[in-house]
Image (spheres, rainbow, N blue to C red):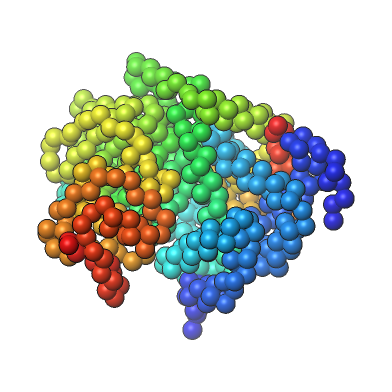
Amino acid sequence: MQERGGTALIRLYLERRSDLVRFFTMRLRSVAAAEDLVQDIYVRLSGLDQPTEIQNPMAYLYRLGSNLMLDRLRGERRTAHRDGAWLDSQTTRIGTEEISAEPSAEAAVAARQRLALLTAAIAELNPQTQRVFRMHKFEGLSHPEVAAALGISRSAVEKHMMAALKHLLGRLP
Amino acid sequence: MSRTEEIPGPGGVAAAVAEEAAGWFARLQGEAATGDDWLAFERWLQRSPTHARAYEGLERLWVDLDYAPVARDLGGRPLMAARRRRASRGSAASPGRRAWIGAGAAIAAGLAVAVGLGLWSAPGVAIQTYQTGPGQTRQIALADGTHIQLNAASKITVSLGRDARRVEMADAEAVFDVAHDTARPFLIAVGDRQVRVVGTEFNLRHRADKVALTVRRGVVEVRPADALQADPTRVTIGQMLTYTEGEAGSILKVSDPGAAFAWTSGQQIYRDQPLSEVAADLSRRFATPVRTADAHTASLRFSGVLVTDSEPEVLRRLQAFVPVRVEQTAGAVVLHSR
């Protein structure tokens, strides 16, 4: 009988929990923070309600935890970005009414400058790299989906992503 | 591996390190990465603090890019094909699976089905259902540049059509950061009202028959779902609109948007709200449901900020603010007044 995806993952999680704690302790520079995060991975796993086909279950656990780290980072960065980092040069129009965004805080100004740099750097990418990057990052397509849509291999997608990320990182002060 | 770390490039990161970090980031995001890749990545990180710094720089820019203005037309048909495949593979909504609209709102349900027929039959429109379980939240980046952050125990259906972008909101709470597009209004069916957006950021909460809309940027219009030509109620920055399904009136008041958006940064903010609401929020946030033992406990009022990091911690803090004690039963946490 086919084992439910969630159950197999939880078993693997329990077997390899100490590996995860060690890895995230290094990433978070704190045992307590790592324990919390690894516990969160468990909470997510218990919430998986459908059998999931996962190619590399162990990599999936690491990725899940890394995405939780990114979510936390999002929470921290949100303050800087909110109140009009990416749209505040625009006004909102409803009917004949035009509403300007709220004035930005200093943090929002810094965030906007950073974003302007990144946006300009994306525009500098060669067309195919740019397409791959946008589809994966902004359209939310997975690597295999991008590969299928563009008729290229998965490793080509990976190479384009790597080139794009390296370029963007190099453009930041 | 890299022996060029001493030569800093732009951003204080040596080009070779930046390249390796980018390589790891790209590889580990792909489904082809293996457990061994992660172990090798761990060793790479340990080799030098500059490695960790470069990787963290990538994570920060990855997150910041969530706010980038995104071009909409990204490649035409192949992309649509990919989206359609994804929609049909996942739990894409079909007209038969709309029971969640709620039997109580008969008129609203009727309308939603009518809208739905037009929606489902439109060619080339991918319909996608997004769902979270208790304790899960989810970031959704739509093709039009709109970002949706879905709170725990929530379900929405999205379809991006040529003339309108539509969302149906079942029992759910979400922050919408809607990309500006005058040509395609963003329409949300929520209970017996329709919310119309052009480009703005707001939190929308639909739990049981209660709806609350809080706007952080721009203006949102709300109309009865069965009278779309009626003059709308306009909700703007710093206002909150609340209403109960099936009742005609709405309440519009001044509100700090921070409170409504707090869940996105792992907090819940309450102002003189009954413990029953706090318990319901915690049940969505965590794996073990939280109940109140009796009507008296349910009616205790709570004001304050709860950091929702872990269930035992939250309950411990709650006991410091509210005269309750916590009982752990099989499968639930029960709050008793003391």
Q: Is residue B167 left or right of residue A79?
A: left
Q: Residue drawn at (42%, 55%), measured in percent from left and top?
A: B309
Residue B20 place in picture, x, y as percent? 77, 50
Asked whether B226 or B196 is in front, the reply is B196
Q: Quadrant of the N terminus of chain B?
A: bottom right
Q: Is residue A95 visible?
A: yes
The reply to whether residue A41 is visible in this rendering is: no
| Left or right side of B178 for A21 | right
**Residue at the (28%, 71%) spot, across then down:** B328
Please state which of residues B289 and B168 is positioned toward the viewer in this rendering. Answer: B289
Corner quadrant of residue A139: top right
Residue furthest out toward the bottom? A1
Which residue lies at the image location 32% right of the left edge and 60% below the top edge?
Answer: B315
Q: Quadrant of the rendered structure where residue B107 is?
A: top left
- Judge left or right: residue B263 versus residue A173: left
Image coordinates of residue B22 in percent, x first then y, are 72, 48
How many numbered discs sit on the rendered protein? 0
Q: For residue A49, what is the image quadrant?
A: bottom left
Q: Nearer the viewer, residue B109 or B223?
A: B223
Residue pictured at 77% horizontal, 53% vertical: B48
Task: Where is residue B186? Give x, y as percent.
Answer: 38, 35
Question: In front here: B300 or B2?
Answer: B300
Q: Quadrant of the C terminus of chain B?
A: bottom left
